[in-house]
Every structure is written in C-alpha cells, then in structure tokens.
Amino acid sequence: MDVHGQQKAQEALDVEIKSFFDSAPPLRNIENVSEDLKKFIEMNSSGTRSARKVVCVTSGGTTVPLEQKCVRYIDNFSSGHRGAASTEYFLKAGYSVIFLYRKGTCQPYCSLLPDYPFLECFEFTHGSGIQVRQPYSEAVKWAISEHHAAVADGTLLKLPFTTIFEYLQILHMVATSLRSLGPYALFYLAAAVSDFYVPWESMAEHKIQSGSGPLDMRLVQVPKMLSVLRSEWAPTAYCISFKLETDVKILLEKANAALKKYKMHMVIANELLTRKEEVTLVTDNENIHVRRDPKQVGNEVEKHIIEHIVEKHSTYVDDLDQKVSRDTGS
Amino acid sequence: MDVHGQQKAQEALDVEIKSFFDSAPPLRNIENVSEDLKKFIEMNSSGTRSARKVVCVTSGGTTVPLEQKCVRYIDNFSSGHRGAASTEYFLKAGYSVIFLYRKGTCQPYCSLLPDYPFLECFEFTHGSGIQVRQPYSEAVKWAISEHHAAVADGTLLKLPFTTIFEYLQILHMVATSLRSLGPYALFYLAAAVSDFYVPWESMAEHKIQSGSGPLDMRLVQVPKMLSVLRSEWAPTAYCISFKLETDVKILLEKANAALKKYKMHMVIANELLTRKEEVTLVTDNENIHVRRDPKQVGNEVEKHIIEHIVEKHSTYVDDLDQKVSRDTGS
C-alpha cells in the first residue's frame, strides 16, 4: 500500500473507532475505575528510572450483546486461565499488574483449585466450625495469602469487564494512563476479544422473538484497536498480543501477519487444543517455541513465557534508555 | 388447527427433534450421569404413595456453539440465581432436588455471598491460618453446612451442563427416569434455553475468520421440547416453565400462549428488570401475582413462589390419586 493508501486506511479506521466509542453505552462507575487507576499508577511509578515496571494483563472473553436490554449475547470461549497464571508470574518477577478480567473467570492464584472452591474446599463440623478440607489445605492457604498480599501491597489492581464495550473503554483508559511510564509499561493482551459486534444503535431494544423461521443476523467487525493502542494510546509501551487458532496450519502465518499489521513487539501464537502445553513467541527477528515440561509438577507454560518476556522487555527498556541518553547527549 | 393439521405439526416436530438429537455431539461421561440419576431416584422413591416428591430444577443459560472446535458461542443471560434460590426452598419443603445447572452459575445457599466467595470471604493470618472474615461468618457457615448436608443426605443431585446439546440430552434422561414417579415428579424449568442454534453438521469446523466484511449468520429454531416432555418423556409429571420478556406489554399474553401451546400446568411470567421483585404464576384457572416484601430481610420472591407451587402440586397429586382410586374402585 502506498502512503496515500495508508493514510486513507488510517482515516477509515479512525472513523470506525470513533463510531464504536460514540455508540457504546456509557461505562458504569467510570469515576471509581479512573480514581483506582490514578492511585495505582502514582503508587507504582516514582518517576525515576528505577520505577517498577507495570503490566496490563487482559484476561477472559468479551461478550457482544444482541439486544439492548440484554438477554442474548455472543461470547468468546476463555476460562481466563492464561491471564490469571501469567499475572502470578509477573508479580513474582517484580511487576505491578493491572488485571483487566472478565467477570466470573479464573483469578490469580486460584488455578489449582476446583471450579467452585468455596463449596469444594471447605467443610463444616459442629466441633470446630468451618475448616479447609485436607487435600486442599496447602493450595487454599497459598491462594488466599498470596492473593490478599498482592492486593494489599498495591501491586495488583483488578478491573472487571463483561461486554466488548466495557473492555475497550477500560483498556483505553488504562493505556492512556500508562503512557506516562513510557517503555516501562507492558501490555499482555490475553483476553479473547470479539471480532464481530452489533452496533448499539442498530441493536434490537427488546428480546428478539422466536416466532417463526430462522434468525438472520449481520455482525460488523470490531475496529482493530491494536493499531491505535500502539500508535496513539501508549506509543512507547511494549505490546504483546495473542493469536488463537484451531487450525495449526494457518497459525504462525496469522501470528506473523498480526505482528506486522499492528506493529506488535510480540505475538504469542497458540492452538486451542495444545495451548496449555506449548506456544510460539513470534517477534521481528525470531520465533521462540516454548513448551511446558510435563515431568515437573506445577510447571506451567506461563512460567516460561513470562521469563522470556521479562528478558525481552528489559532489553527494550535499556535500548530506549540508551537512545534517550544518546539523543540528549547525557 | 384441525386434527389433521395437528397431526402434521406433530410429525414435523418429531422430525425436528430427531434431527436435533441425531446431530448433537455425544454427551461426555453419559454413564456417570445415568448411574447417578438411577441411584438418586431409587433412594428417593420407595414406591409407596408416601414417597418423597422429586423436583428437577433447571438453572442458568444454555450456550449455542458457532464452531465445532468452539471459540465463539451465543449465550443466554442468566445468573442462575432463581434456580439456586428455588432449590433451597424446595429442599426446605421436603422435596428431593435434581439441580440441572449451567457450569459456573449461582449455587444453592450461595446467593447471599459475593461473586468470588472464596477470595472475598476468607483471610489468612500467620497466627491462626485460614479464617472466615467477620461480616460473612454466618452466611459462610450456613452455605457450607446446608449445601453439604443436602448433598450428603442424597436429597440434592447436581448435574452441570454448558451447551444446549448437553442441556436437552440430560433433561431427556432426567425426564424419562422420573417417569416412574408419575405425578410425584415436578419440573421447574427456570433455565434460559436458547431459542436458536446452529445445527452441528452445518457448523464451521474451525474458528470463523474475521478477514473482511461483516459476518452473516443463519440460526434455526431449537425444536420446542416442552411439548414432548409433557406428551412423551414424563406425561404425568407436574410441569412449570418460565417466560422472560423485557417488554412487559406482551408478557402475560406470551405466558398464556405458552401455557396452552405446551400444555404446561403453570407458566411463571417474569420481566427482566423486576424479576427479583415480582412474578405472575399463570395457570389454567387463575393468575397469581407474587411479590417480595421488601421490608422483610432475606425475604426472596422464590420463597412465595415455592409455597404456591407446593400447594398446587399437592392438590395435583391428590386429584390424580383419587382418580386412580375411583378408576380401580378401591
């Protein structure tokens, strides 16, 4: 595409994005989110170069309402396990984490617990009241103490979303807030974001009636916010997105295309069935294949992913710092 | 519709239902579900007239996969609160309950707790380990002890589902298993069941690509299983279905139509925004308007709904018993 064509495409995208946000229902308790974010970033950035690195981990699927008074919606499959486990390793590596998660999905430190830990992990005895059930005692102690410590220390900020409208509005707020951290900010976009949506103003107000015949629906594409995240919202942050496919034949090709198209620093390619075992970290100059060692207990693939990212992000920060030093002659 | 027309419609429905079940992906661990059900019904039916009444409460929304290797699906909004709370009141009234619930939705005895009770209700102290946090101590004790008691006594059987395919297959199994209880069986169908689905064989195998342009989808109607539940699966059970609308103007009319069309014994009409405050119990000869008393703490609308149902179901059983006595001359 020539320069003129690129400019045209950019203008078209800007119009799409403006129309998406203009038509989105306004975010509830926007003041609280904004206040929490402000406090969190102040606390976690001292303004010096030794400031803490901050990562925004997005997790879980976004929903697309099909009716304004919503009864039906389209959802993306995601347990939120990847985002939750990655959050643990980022915290361990010294990052502060903004965990932007789908309400109801997996929480950090809880991935080893059963689906309903509250009902499964405790028992009541008339003698001693509520007790942790034996097989879970270590996992429960670890989950509750680590989780509470991170929240209490102010190194973990949790922001829930449900719809695609909420997700993109909060992501926008987070990104512009993190802009001040420059390269110390990292985006780890593990959420399964809807590709298609029904624009709010063209949505049925009431429940769609199932009177007669099939239901035909037309969904339009969600504008690709990754480009504006990179170019406008937080232009010097390190950005990692995910590519999930079910067809392994097209996976790396798709990941590479996304890397170039959205100018990501890294795209993590994963296939639905093997995603807990292995992924490929696709960057400009290399593909790193990461695999869980199944012989080691508690060894999650996220451990290795985060190790690689911490290293790459560190190099990125140092390079930019040196560049700034050179440019300012200091 | 004349008799000939009715027969035609019935034949068309039979074909649709057969095609739905034939094309559905086979239920995983079907043997376990079948075994659990068998044990539960044996335990809760002595074969005499004083046998325990058994209710099947369905709860939460069903999903409709849009891809065979499922990344995207259509979902119906439902927290599962109605089904969970109703289960508590049925157990209290002496019923045994088969709780057919959407994985991840609200569980009986947990409705007063926060969204993530495991993380919110407990704390860890180095002195005394895991403890219940003060404001929740009574609610947690009640939830865990009542829930475990019901499961341990064998009066509560919990069966999870996710997709519309799983839901209807398990409901079919439950209904044919409960047939032996005759009028002592009750169906309380509070689940938000999808009206439209994509037949398995016409479904994309892989993730739908978002390459270019809008996505057009054609969904076909899920065959109305309520009719066959009444006519074939469990013809003498007492059947209650729900009608949820967002437009209050059409609600009672729709509920009445469903009562007649599916030969339900009762349809519970509720409107999305006020459903926790009031509902109307629509039967052949009366409409009972039920309202929560907001002045009484812990007073849920389900308490009053279940009181009315227990009474109606009791009359229904007595009437059928008397009829049998008359017919057999005993």
Image (spheres, coloured by chain):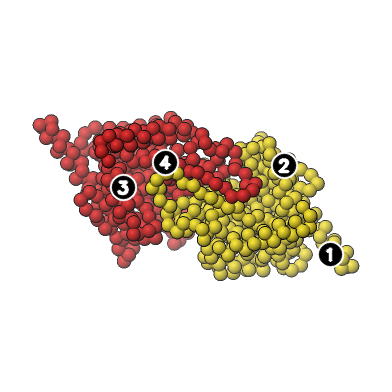
Chain colours: A yellow, B red
Q: Are marks 2 and 3 in contact (CB under 8 Å)?
A: no
Q: Are marks 2 and 4 in contact (CB under 8 Å)?
A: no
At label 4, the amino acid type is Val
> What residue does disc 3 label?
B258
Q: CA distance from mark 1 to mark 4?
A: 62 Å
Q: Are marks 1 and 4 in contact (CB under 8 Å)?
A: no
At label 1, the amino acid type is Val
Q: Nearer the viewer, mark 1 or mark 2?
A: 2
Which subunit holds the residue at mark 2?
A
Question: Residue B37's image quarter?
Answer: top left
The spot of residue B168 in percent (x, y) is: 40, 38
On residue B222, the disc is 4
Q: CA distance from mark 1 to mark 2?
A: 34 Å
Which subunit holds the residue at mark 1?
A
At label 2, the amino acid type is Glu
Which subunit holds the residue at mark 3?
B
* Residue B32 visible somewhere in the drawing: no
At label 3, the amino acid type is Ala
Q: Residue at x 45, y 44 (%)?
A: A214
Considering the image in quadrants, where does the N terminus of chain B appear? top left
Q: CA distance from mark 3 to mark 4?
A: 15 Å
> What residue does disc 2 label?
A253
Q: Residue at x 70, y 45 (%)?
A: A255
Count neighbours of disc 1 (C-alpha within 10 A) and say few if under 14, some if 14 to 19, many if 20 or more.
few
Q: Nearer the viewer, mark 3 or mark 1?
A: 3
On residue A324, the disc is 1
Q: Is residue B304 left or right of residue B224?
A: left
